[in-house]
Structures are given as C-alpha cells and as structure tokens.
Amino acid sequence: MTYAELSQTLKSIAERTNVIGFDFVEVNPQLYVGTGITSYIGAHTIMEFLGHICAQPRWAKRRDAQLAKRR
C-alpha cells in the first residue's frame, strides 16, 4: 500500500464512520537511522488522521457549541 492509498483510506474511514480510537503499530525508527523517513511518515499519518477525525460532524458540532458558549 502506498502512502497515498493509506491516506485516502483513512480519510474515507473518518468521513464514513465515527472513529473513537485507533492504534498505529509497527514503526521501528531504529531500522531507519539514516533518514528517519519512517518515523516522519508515521507521525504525519497520525496527525493527518486525527485532523480528519476532528472534522467529523459530531466533533465539529461539539466544537461549535463550545465556541458559542464562550461568546
């Protein structure tokens, strides 16, 4: 699976389901000491997926309600 395929799959999952948790496993930065690209892609994948999860309607609705309370 390419990174683009993984990214699109995770985006689709976040758009179509209510994600309440996930595990990201099997990144071993010690195997890629020279470049660190595996660790970078792993961290980027997590942050991107969290962004898609936070864009879910239920999270957006909750966020908007909390912002309205502050005003």
Image (tube, grey):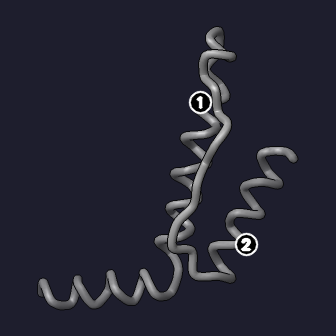
Residue at the far top in the pictured view: 34
**Residue 1 vertical placement versus 19 (above, below):** above
Q: Quadrant of residue 10?
A: bottom right
Residue closest to the eye, 47 or 30: 30
Which residue is at a point 60% across and 22% down the rendered structure image?
Answer: 29
Q: Is residue 13 left or right of residue 55?
A: right
Cβ atoms at labels 2 and 1 below 8 Å apart = no
Residue 28 vertical placement versus 65 (above, below):
above
Q: Which residue is mark 1?
A: 39
64 to the left or right of 57: left
Q: Quadrant of residue 33?
A: top right
SS under mark 2: helix
Residue 17 is marked as: none
Question: In the image, residue 7 lies at what x, y percent?
Answer: 72, 56
Residue furthest toward the right? Answer: 1
User: In the image, what residue occupies the spot 65% across and 25% down?
Assistant: 37
The picture places residue 8, in percent across and down from the top left corner, at 76, 62
Label located before the other in sequence (2 or 1): 2
> Is 11 left, or right, of 48 in this rendering?
right
Q: Secondary structure at mark 1?
A: helix
Q: Residues within 10 Å of mark 2 (few under 14, many from 20)?
A: few
Along the viewing direction, whichever of 64 and 43 lies nearer the viewer = 43
Q: Which x, y percent locates residue 36?
A: 61, 20
Please state which amino acid type lies under the numbered disc 2: Ser
Left or right of 3 in this view: 14: left
> Quick one: which residue is furthest to the left in this view?
71
Judging by the rendered image, the residue that carries numbered circle 2 is 12
